[in-house]
Image (tube, rainbow, N blue to C red):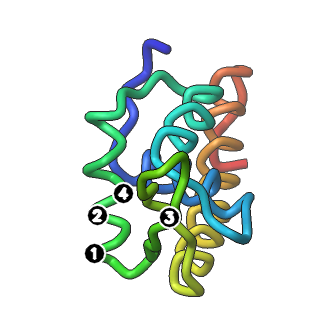
Amino acid sequence: MIFNTGAALLDAIVLAVVSRNAEGTYGYKITQDVRHAIEISESTLYPVLRRLLKDGCLETYDRQFDGRNRRYYKITPQGYAQLNLYRAEWKVYSEKISRLFAGEDADR
Protein backbone atom coordinates (compact mmCIF):
# COMPACT_ATOMS: atom_id res chain seq x y z
CA MET A 1 0.00 0.00 0.00
CA ILE A 2 1.35 3.41 -0.90
CA PHE A 3 -0.42 5.32 1.88
CA ASN A 4 1.38 5.87 5.18
CA THR A 5 -0.21 4.32 8.23
CA GLY A 6 -0.14 6.59 11.26
CA ALA A 7 -0.09 5.55 14.90
CA ALA A 8 -3.83 6.04 15.44
CA LEU A 9 -4.73 3.87 12.46
CA LEU A 10 -2.31 1.16 13.61
CA ASP A 11 -3.83 1.28 17.09
CA ALA A 12 -7.33 0.99 15.62
CA ILE A 13 -6.40 -1.96 13.39
CA VAL A 14 -4.68 -3.83 16.23
CA LEU A 15 -7.60 -3.25 18.60
CA ALA A 16 -10.01 -4.49 15.92
CA VAL A 17 -7.94 -7.64 15.37
CA VAL A 18 -7.55 -8.39 19.09
CA SER A 19 -11.25 -7.74 19.76
CA ARG A 20 -12.30 -10.56 17.40
CA ASN A 21 -11.28 -13.19 19.97
CA ALA A 22 -12.75 -12.91 23.47
CA GLU A 23 -9.92 -15.06 24.88
CA GLY A 24 -7.26 -12.83 23.35
CA THR A 25 -4.59 -13.66 20.81
CA TYR A 26 -0.81 -13.72 20.59
CA GLY A 27 1.66 -11.42 18.83
CA TYR A 28 2.54 -13.53 15.78
CA LYS A 29 -1.15 -14.20 15.04
CA ILE A 30 -1.92 -10.49 15.44
CA THR A 31 0.81 -9.70 12.89
CA GLN A 32 -0.62 -12.22 10.43
CA ASP A 33 -4.16 -10.91 10.85
CA VAL A 34 -3.10 -7.27 10.49
CA ARG A 35 -1.25 -8.19 7.29
CA HIS A 36 -4.60 -8.99 5.69
CA ALA A 37 -5.24 -5.23 5.71
CA ILE A 38 -1.77 -3.62 5.64
CA GLU A 39 1.85 -4.72 5.44
CA ILE A 40 3.42 -4.62 8.88
CA SER A 41 6.51 -6.15 10.44
CA GLU A 42 6.70 -7.64 13.91
CA SER A 43 9.20 -4.91 14.81
CA THR A 44 6.49 -2.34 14.02
CA LEU A 45 3.73 -4.26 15.78
CA TYR A 46 5.31 -4.75 19.21
CA PRO A 47 5.69 -1.02 19.98
CA VAL A 48 1.98 -0.64 19.10
CA LEU A 49 1.11 -3.46 21.51
CA ARG A 50 3.26 -1.88 24.25
CA ARG A 51 1.60 1.52 23.72
CA LEU A 52 -1.89 -0.03 23.90
CA LEU A 53 -0.89 -1.89 27.08
CA LYS A 54 0.45 1.31 28.64
CA ASP A 55 -2.75 3.16 27.70
CA GLY A 56 -4.90 0.47 29.35
CA CYS A 57 -6.49 -0.70 26.09
CA LEU A 58 -4.96 -4.18 26.27
CA GLU A 59 -3.97 -6.61 28.99
CA THR A 60 -1.71 -9.65 28.78
CA TYR A 61 -1.49 -13.14 30.16
CA ASP A 62 0.81 -16.07 29.46
CA ARG A 63 -0.25 -19.56 28.41
CA GLN A 64 1.80 -22.70 27.86
CA PHE A 65 2.19 -23.74 24.22
CA ASP A 66 4.53 -26.52 23.07
CA GLY A 67 6.49 -26.38 26.29
CA ARG A 68 6.99 -22.63 26.42
CA ASN A 69 5.02 -19.58 27.45
CA ARG A 70 3.14 -17.63 24.80
CA ARG A 71 2.03 -14.09 25.65
CA TYR A 72 -1.60 -13.34 24.83
CA TYR A 73 -3.14 -9.90 24.39
CA LYS A 74 -6.75 -9.25 25.32
CA ILE A 75 -8.78 -6.08 24.81
CA THR A 76 -10.03 -4.30 27.95
CA PRO A 77 -13.28 -2.36 28.44
CA GLN A 78 -11.23 0.82 27.90
CA GLY A 79 -9.88 -0.74 24.70
CA TYR A 80 -13.43 -1.43 23.47
CA ALA A 81 -14.35 2.19 24.17
CA GLN A 82 -11.31 3.39 22.22
CA LEU A 83 -12.08 0.98 19.37
CA ASN A 84 -15.65 2.31 19.16
CA LEU A 85 -14.29 5.85 18.97
CA TYR A 86 -11.90 4.80 16.18
CA ARG A 87 -14.76 3.10 14.31
CA ALA A 88 -16.93 6.23 14.45
CA GLU A 89 -14.05 8.48 13.38
CA TRP A 90 -13.06 6.09 10.57
CA LYS A 91 -16.62 6.07 9.21
CA VAL A 92 -16.69 9.86 8.92
CA TYR A 93 -13.11 10.10 7.61
CA SER A 94 -13.43 7.35 5.01
CA GLU A 95 -16.76 8.70 3.73
CA LYS A 96 -15.24 12.17 3.24
CA ILE A 97 -12.20 10.80 1.41
CA SER A 98 -14.40 8.56 -0.76
CA ARG A 99 -16.56 11.56 -1.70
CA LEU A 100 -13.46 13.55 -2.63
CA PHE A 101 -12.15 10.69 -4.79
CA ALA A 102 -15.57 10.48 -6.47
CA GLY A 103 -15.37 14.20 -7.35
CA GLU A 104 -17.95 15.27 -4.80
CA ASP A 105 -17.82 17.88 -2.03
CA ALA A 106 -16.36 16.21 1.10
CA ASP A 107 -18.63 18.21 3.46
CA ARG A 108 -21.90 17.02 1.92
- Please tell me which of labels 1 and 4 falls first in the chain: 4
Disc 3 residue crowd, few under 14, some 14–19, many 20+, Cα 10 Å: many
Query: Is residue 80 placed above or below 20 in the rendered structure?
Result: below
Q: Secondary structure at mark 3?
A: strand
Q: Secondary structure at mark 4?
A: helix
Q: Residue furthest front?
A: 67
Residue drawn where x is 63% and y is 56% of the image = 16
Q: CB under 8 Å between callouts 3 and 4?
A: yes
Query: Is residue 35 placed above or below 87 in the rendered structure?
Result: above
**Count of numbered marks:** 4
Q: CB under 8 Å between callouts 2 and 3?
A: no
Q: Which mark lies nearer to you, 3 or 4? A: 3
Q: CB under 8 Å between callouts 4 and 2?
A: yes
Nearer to me, 7 or 105: 7
Which numbered marker is on residue 54?
1
The residue that mark 4 highlights is 49
Q: Secondary structure at mark 1?
A: helix
Nearer to me, 9 or 40: 40
- Please tell me which of labels 3 and 1 falls first in the chain: 1
Residue drawn where x is 35% and y is 71% of the image = 53
Disc 3 from disc 1: Cα separation: 13 Å
Residue 67 picture location, percent across and down: 47, 51
Q: Which mark lies nearer to you, 3 or 1? A: 3
Residue drawn where x is 36% and y is 42% of the image = 45
- Please tell me which of labels 3 and 4 falls first in the chain: 4
Task: Tell me which amino acid carries mark 4.
Answer: Leu
